[in-house]
Image (cartoon, helix red, strand yellow):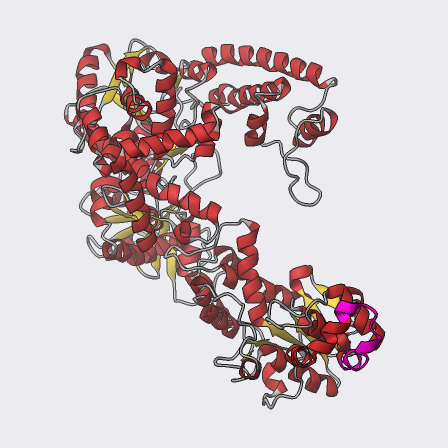
Amino acid sequence: MARRLFLIDSFGFIFRAYHARARSGAPPMRTGTGLSTEAVYIFNNMVRKLQKSFHPDWIAAIFESEGPTLREQEFKEYKATRAETPPDLLDQIPLIRRLLDALRIPVLDYRGYEADDVIGTMSRRAAEQGIEVVVVSSDKDMLQLVDERVSMLNPAKDDAWYDPDKVREFMGVRPDQVADLLALKGDSVDNIPGAPGIGDKGAKDLIERFGSVEAALERASEVERKAYRESLRDHREQILLSKKLATISCDVPIEYSLDELAAREPDLDSLKQIYKELEFHSLLRELGPSEDTRTKDYGPLEAADLDVIPRHAPLAVAIHPGEPGTLDLPGLGLAWKPGMARAAAPPFSEPLRALLEDAAWPKIACDIKATELALERYGVHSRGFADDVMLYAFLLDADPGACSLEDMAQRRLDLKLGASPEQQADCVLELNEQLRAAVDARGLRSLYETMELPFTGVLARMESTGILVDPAELGRLSGLMQEGIERLTAEVYELAGKPFNLNSPQQLGKVLFEDLGLPAPVRYGKGKTISTAAGILEDLAPDYPIVAKVLEYRQLAKLKGTYVDALPTLIDPGTGRLHTTFNQAGSATGRLSSSNPNLQNIPIRSELGREIRAAFVPRPGWKLVVADYSQIELRLLAHFSGDPVLVESFVHGEDIHTRTAAEVFGIAPLMVTAELRRNAKAVNFGIVYGISGFGLAAQLGIPRAEAEKYIKSYFQRYAGVKRFIDSTIAEVRRTGVTRTLFGRERPIPDINSRNPNARGFAERTAVNSPLQGTAADLIKLAMIRIDQRLTQEGAASRMLLQVHDELLFESPPEELDALTQMVKREMEQVHALKVPLVADVGAGDNWRDAK
């Protein structure tokens, strides 16, 4: 195979990458600081694929030059209709040039000449030297360069490859006639005027008949169609100018060396640096970590090592977990200076145990809670942990997916985390130096020390305590649910007219949308089935009984599989209790998540969901206590907005939904019916989550115009809320982040997106995050204080669970009154707001009845 030169029409791909993503509806790509990156990302992927697929011998990226080009000097209107380059795309051009430097692909531009002419000239010269040339472009103008030695590759069309025959098939003319074709039909992209009244078909017919523009002009009198004949006769100079503008010059005076264009391996260090800056984490992982060439002093912990560790020097502790599902702890790593670490395995020596239990010796971990719980299983009551790199990373980025030690090692240190506990401890030590400084610089130290750090101990104690569930009650529910599943299955089969696999989206889609002919949603992509996602079925359910029964079946099957049948298998045989794992870095708003099992999402609106809660019980003879913040996000909306009507309503203890109904519908509170209150409740909570008229209409089953009238009326009566929403969005547009009352930050990178869907979602997130995040912060503070009170008072009562705005405790009878009073007081007095916080507290023999 002949050696090949690849010439990339860079600007063409940059613009197409930018606009194609916007048209696709995909959210724009931005870094945590709000820097747009989608054009860089797509351009990078195109170039890397090009290199991998075709292995160029020579390669260059051609850019437009600065300043006016020769065409613009000759015809001022040339390209005048093109829109201004969006600022966020302009910001990406220097990044793309940096990327090309890192890929070691030469970048060429020549003042006064367009990229087309540079590519044309380079193509001609290389072809004359016997080199095959591949023009990488999606611009049809470039097809005029194609000949026996020059091809065009269009990655935007699945790597469509154009030789002369393919050009003739695609354009309807030979490559050497493409400029003639454009001269007649014009080109709106470049503002080439062409021949008025002659379109694409007419231009092709004329070129096919006469061979060139010049011949068509000379023989215009032979053209039968009057409009064409007059256009050729009356616009001769414009047509000739159009051909000149459309013709790519292949003899511009540029100098370059073919040797300088030789394909080379990328500069991996530079490429990694760019990927890291632009947060291209998946691309960074593909490159793999850099080789760690630093000197390492690793090994097993000897008694003498404990004597050489500087007294009270910050000590990084890393737990190397055992096999999944076991409590084995094969290794513990200690690091006290960069590159120096030791490993120990249980049983631990007394000197090591004393070091780990010394509260005055500062320690560092990645997930203090998990580290302390792991050590506790081996009888080590560790103390002194002050720095948690997982929580530092979470406070800095609010990204739950970027807080594992492995991920931080890759992203922040460019290291592949090994299995040795020594390396892990060394990595924790190095991360701490970087992240601790960043937390201080961002002003997040107080949030860490007053909330996140003490909260680790609260969660550790809750996880250790666990909660009792009644397997017999769950078994009873499982039987009832199985009966319901079988009944619903039979009913769906009867309505469908045949049996099929209800759990198969493909078979369900075929039954609903082909066999029964229900209105089908848009088909997604090639070869994919019609979607049977919940949102689509919920729209159809009111009108089609079979769909309603499918949704009921799905809910029942999910409850049975996720909770009723799964929970008994997760009971710890040693304690007889469920011990969920709380993830302190589980949600961007600061809310907790939980796993194994996930107890945050047990439904409470359905009767069956409430029945599952009835299986959660206290120890025999005790009571479960449930405390729940009342309407906390609406109260925080009143606090943040300062709206006088909303504040007054909460201060006076009014029913907020009744008051809203009275305000919105213009009636006396006594005239508010149950339905009007329900509608007002939907508006109240919908405002918090940025509900639209369309969404409210769907929720209430009312016309969209009526729903929009409700929202408009709400904002007229609660003008302070409208000002809060508008000012919050404006502030986030300026800063790119939201903040809770206590300073917790969350980046909102899409707040200035061109994509209306992405921008709308970002605006709703910008408004809701301070409310939901502050609610999460308040209950954390309340839990810390309640935990302190229980410890100080030596109470037997224990805090068991936190589910968003709700806390669960178990209490012996003699402590019940004191506990309920203390919990209510601490929750309501946790922080002074413009409106009172209200906590509802109840007790019962199970979670359901305590509500």
Picture residue at 29% right of the left edge, 26% below the top: 631
**Among the 4 quarters of the image, the one containing residue 783:** top left
**Among the 4 quarters of the image, the one containing residue 33:** bottom left
Towards the viewer: 269 or 76: 76
Picture residue at 36% right of the left edge, 33% below the top: 712
Main SS, magenta region, reads helix
Q: Is residue 822 magenta?
A: no
Q: Is residue 222 magenta?
A: yes
Towards the viewer: 708 or 109: 708
Query: In screen coordinates, is 503 left or right of 620?
Result: right
The mark tally for this picture is 0
Instruction: Measuring from the top left, give residue 425's x and y in whole percent.
Output: 36, 52
Quarter holding the C terminus is top left
Instruction: Measuring from the top left, give residue 34's x and y in whole percent.
Output: 39, 56
**Among the 4 quarters of the image, the one containing residue 167:** bottom right
> Which segment is the magenta one?
214-228
Instruction: Measuring from the top left, give residue 361's x and y in whole percent.
Output: 20, 48
Query: In screen coordinates, is 825 left or right of 463?
Result: left
